[in-house]
Image: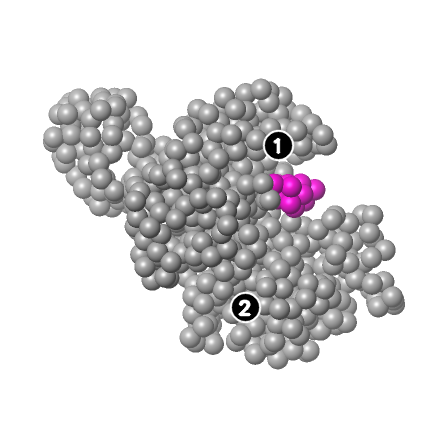
Amino acid sequence: MAPKSSTRVPLSVKGPIDCPYEGKEMLNLPQFNRGTAFTAEERDLFNLVGNLPAALQTLQNQVDRAYDQYSSISTALGKNTFLMSLKVQNEVLYFKLLQDHLKEMFSIIYTPTESEAIEHYSRLFRRPEGCFLNINHPEYIERSLAAWGTEEDIDYIIVSDGEEILGIGDQGVGAIGISSAKAVLMTLCAGVHPSRCIPVALDVGTDNEQLLEDELYLGNRHNRVRGGRYDKFVDDFVQCVKKLYPRAVLHFEDFGLPNARRLLDTYRPRLACFNDDVQGTGAVTLAALSSAVRVAGIDFRDLRTVIFGAGTAGTGIADQLRDFLNTQGISKQQVIDHIWLVDKPGLLLKSMHDKLTSAQRPYAASDDRWKEIDTKSLSEIVKKVKPHVLIGCSTKPKAFNEAVLREMAKHVERPIVFPLSNPTRLHEATPAEIFKYTDGKTLVATGSPFDPVDGKEIAENNNCFVYPGIGMGSILSRADRVTETMIAAVVKELASLAPSEKDPTGALLPDVADIRDISAKIATAVVLQALEEGTARVEEIEGIKVPRDRDHCLEWVKEQMWKPEYRPLRKV
């Protein structure tokens, strides 16, 4: 059993908020500002008289006004900019607006619009947000991180070096945009208090020539630092996290192919850490796949899978499928033998060993079985393999063309096709195209939101279904590691929530509109698994024993979730 901490974990999201500020200073702090919703008593107590219009309004009044303003903006990027501006003015109002209009605004605050905002980060910049760590000044890492609070104040840290962001590649210091967006979703989906997350950008330079030549670019103006110096910088950062915030969960985001898996393998035995591109993408895809396999009546043991795009996400999906089925009693090698990876050189073969990453090598196919086959042709690969499943992580638009899709439909009764690349313009195929070329019999999940096709709801294979719940569950249990069995518990829980569980014609994943309830259930699965396997470091929080039965644990988790509401203010 892991040692249990006797330290109380102050995660309360109820009761009055201590506030040492007043007047204009208070109005300029998004954590405390309430604008026209300050009561008459609060205006007097905090010296706000004369700083606000006379009307006393409710949070709902403010949400209605903000929504009208949002609706008047014609472009998605303009809406994203408006919401970011609101966030740095009034935190509660920002999250309440998002919560009330979640499904409409989700694609604005995350993929696909957030990728556009990140591409233009230096030109849209208004106010710094998050922690910027500079590889040219590693001596400031600890000082910079320590400025965010004590070990009691921080639960979750999202870090990116910006090398491989949302299908748009190397964005340098724009990495802070994806770290901040993920932090927002931690609060919005799982109820982690916004002040208890730190978004971090590791500025190690960029190989994006367009950014290097842009006079307004805000990051280090040199090519990416690699090798020993890079590894030392990352390790210094991780060691500072362990020292300053020993109970926080560390979330790796959008690291490049040479580093993502390597860093995860290095640090996952040492602290509670998680790579969303490897484990998150793999887990949500596996949940959708579990739903599809059930609907199609396929035995997982027989499943043949082609993954087009063998980068961080593609190999992550392969690994999650391998590890999950291994927990179900299927040998890892048996699973590997039924997975084929395709990347820029074509089908990955054993003869390419020296050119493959460590994550790709286990899945390389034997050359002997592919003689006289055009291994660069996806349609020829599909013809040979006769896969049940075709997954796209390539960012190559239209790669799943008519020939590929018709070939799939020849060999299996219910093809399973997941074009997961994002943003939307980089999808391998649209749901409408997939249904058209397979006579409507395909089971589909996509990486970005799509409207229904002929009445069929399209499952959005979005990582937000899993990583906020994994994070919250790890926080509440104070897990010392994020284990494969915890991820497996998440996969099972999410698959059980899919509409297709009750109706075979339903979507393979639940609706993003229900994300808060979904995240609570995912977090519950993580807490219970951590308690069962001994990775949890606390068995009670604020004097309340963590319930071990699912229903009571779920209610307990929901009680720990921060809500966007104006709580009483107490002057200190």
**Which of 441/160 is in front?**
160
- Residue drawn where x is 36% and y is 40% of the image: 9
Decide: is 19 above or below 410. above
Decide: is 507 above or below 555. below
Decide: is 235 above or below 143. below
Secondary element at image label 2: helix
The amino acid sitting under disc 2 is Ser
Q: Give residue 281's quadrant in the image.
A: bottom right
Which badge, 2 or 1, comes first in the chain's sequence? 1
| Contact (Cβ within 8 Å) of mark 2 with mark 1 | no
Viewer can see residue 88: yes
Where residue 40 appears, x then y in whole percent?
11, 31
Q: Quadrant of the C terminus?
A: top left
Give me the disc on residue 348. none
Look at mark 2 in the image and give the residue it sits on.
290
Q: Give residue 512's quadrant in the image.
A: bottom left
* 567 in the magenta segment: no
Where residue 342 appears, x then y in whole percent?
73, 58
Viewer can see residue 78: no
Where residue 233 appears, x then y in whole percent?
63, 28
Which stretch is magenta?
253-267
- Residue drawn where x is 35% and y is 39% of the image: 8
* 265 in the magenta segment: yes
Look at mark 1 in the image and give the residue it sits on.
234
**Which of 113/530 is in front?**
530
Say left or right for 540 vs 226. left
